[in-house]
Image (cartoon, rainbow, N blue to C red):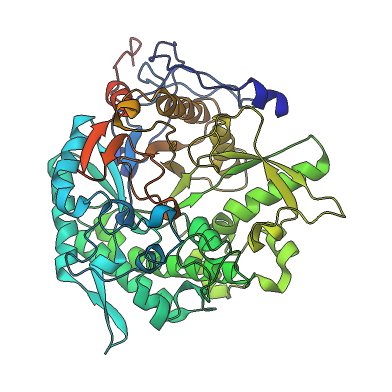
Amino acid sequence: MRDAATRYHLHNDGEDGVPRRRLHLRWPVALLLLGGVGVGVGVRYSAGQAAAAPTQVGACSNGFPPAFIWGLGTSAYQIEGGVNLTGRQPSIWDGFAHTPGKTSNGDTGDVACDHVRLFRSDVELMRSIGLRHYRFSLSWSRAMSWDAARRRMVPNEPGLRFYDALLDALLAAGITPYVTLYHWDLPQALHTELGGWHTPYNAPMHAEFARYAALCFGRYGGRVRFWATFNEPWTFAVEGYSLGQKAPGCVPTGPGPCPDGDAVYVVGHNVLLAHAAAAEVYRREYQPSQRGLLSMSLNCEFSLPLTPSREDAAAAERANEFYLGWWLQPLLSGDYPAVMRQYLGARLPTFSRAQSASLQASIDVLGLNHYSTHLVRAARPHELGDQWCSWITDQRLYSSYGAGWPQAASAWERAYPPGIRLLLRWAAGRSGSRWHGDVLVTENGWGCNSVGAAAAAHDVQQQEYLANYTEQVRLALVEDGVPVRGYFGWSLLDNFEWNDGYSKRFGLFYVDYETQARTPKQAARWWNRTRHCSEKREAGV
């Protein structure tokens, strides 16, 4: 891996000039209804031994099927602003961001991209680059309000009408919505009054989430065909309740790393059970008539062994199970990975038989988010392993990056494009024992190193990151047979990047937060130029 890392560097986009083989894949009806026009790039990378040659079908000249879904994403707290508009109440991110020292420069999401006011012009931005698929989240604190007398959340009509208007604008523009119910912004009242995600076996929280989900399914299900219950539960569980760098910032509040090493697993357990409760409601009451799809977007910074040793190979597999298997395995088997039981023992919560059954087959499509890859070695008997939070300490390993891997503006992000292909094969490969259904890449993007709108307009590195990573997605589809049906880049707009505030920029559009002007970056022009299928197909297809 060191040799591969040293050789790797970002290349120029091949402008779709490389001849592609053709493949035949059966596309599920539901995703065909959602699907759009496919595009690809012309840069090839090796990512280990290729699978057997795929069967043949007609494809666009770039190698992707015409129905491949291409989209971009955002989330509510990161772009909406309007903190006191439409009856919105505070979330845990309001309190966290307004606490001195918690975010870069003391930044908050009070205004963000002012999307609540500017959503119609933002939809026009999407149209300007030919976007046909848009992934976004609802704010629970905007859609519902805390009723202190009844000690429960109740519908907030002004907030619900905002999402009505957004959905109507998207559909009028020919843009398909993909809606996430929870992207980290838990209503503050549920955290303080009902014990939030951190209270063991918190059944009232599971019930509240199911009620929120039912409200959204019932109100918007006629316009939304794709739902994700949670986005990146790993991130808000580990970084919010173990590292303490994201909301709520440890419970009880204090500096991270958080002292309660078990809280992160309690949070994970509650989130999985809340997902299962919402899935049960959707399956029983809404999916039969609405015929939509249910998912969960799980992130994984994929781990590879630093050396060929048996110990390092086991450590890399352990890291992937703690990162992705923690969430994926309960959706498959109804329990956590065996290696987590082995390393955590009684510290890991247990599922009842009924809970296990409710988790299994509770998603229709697997959503995967990916940004970086890690190189892992096992801790030796006299070593403790990485210690930056309790979750990583539990794994007894050390994680690093390859020499020469380009670094984004965020210290945690390094580019190694084959990592996304390897992740797709690990999670949903044809010969694997994990997920055997359709997959969407629901987040992938680059924290730009460019500074200022003028530099962003000529930011080659972001474009190359997207081009190279989408090429690896194509290889996973074409050569490995992974049923990956779509790709959502992160993100449409520069936005509030959580504890990094506005200091990091992932958007395809540069946002001037003083004027709210949006300026297309080079990656936006690349997207507009390459996302359309060229229709160059061989005769007889």
Would residue 5 be found to the left or right of residue 445 on screen?
Answer: right
Q: Residue extending furthest right?
A: 382
- When the figure is inspected, residue 157 is found, relative to residue 131, above or below; the finding is below
Q: Is residue 33 visible?
A: no
Front in this rendered view, residue 367 or 507: 507
- When the figure is inspected, residue 133 is found, relative to residue 37, above or below; the finding is below
Would residue 396 be found to the left or right of residue 73 on screen?
Answer: right
Front in this rendered view, residue 528 or 513: 513
| Number of numbered discs on residues | 0
Which residue occupies 66% across, 29% down?
403
Spot occupied by residue 107 in the image (x, y as percentages of width and height) = 36, 55
Would residue 477 be found to the left or right of residue 511 on screen?
Answer: right
Q: Quadrant of residue 461?
A: top left
Which quadrant of the figure contains the N terminus? Answer: top right
Which quadrant of the figure contains the C terminus? Answer: top left
Which residue occupies 23% across, 30% down?
130
- When the figure is inspected, residue 471 is found, relative to residue 171, above or below; the finding is above
Would residue 378 be found to the left or right of residue 76 on screen?
Answer: right
Which residue occupies 42% across, 20% down?
41
Spot occupied by residue 11 in the image (x, y as percentages of width and height) = 50, 18
- When the figure is inspected, residue 235 is found, relative to residue 536, above or below; the finding is below
Q: Is residue 252 visible?
A: yes
Which residue occupies 24% across, 43% down?
176
Spot occupied by residue 101 in the image (x, y as percentages of width and height) = 46, 61
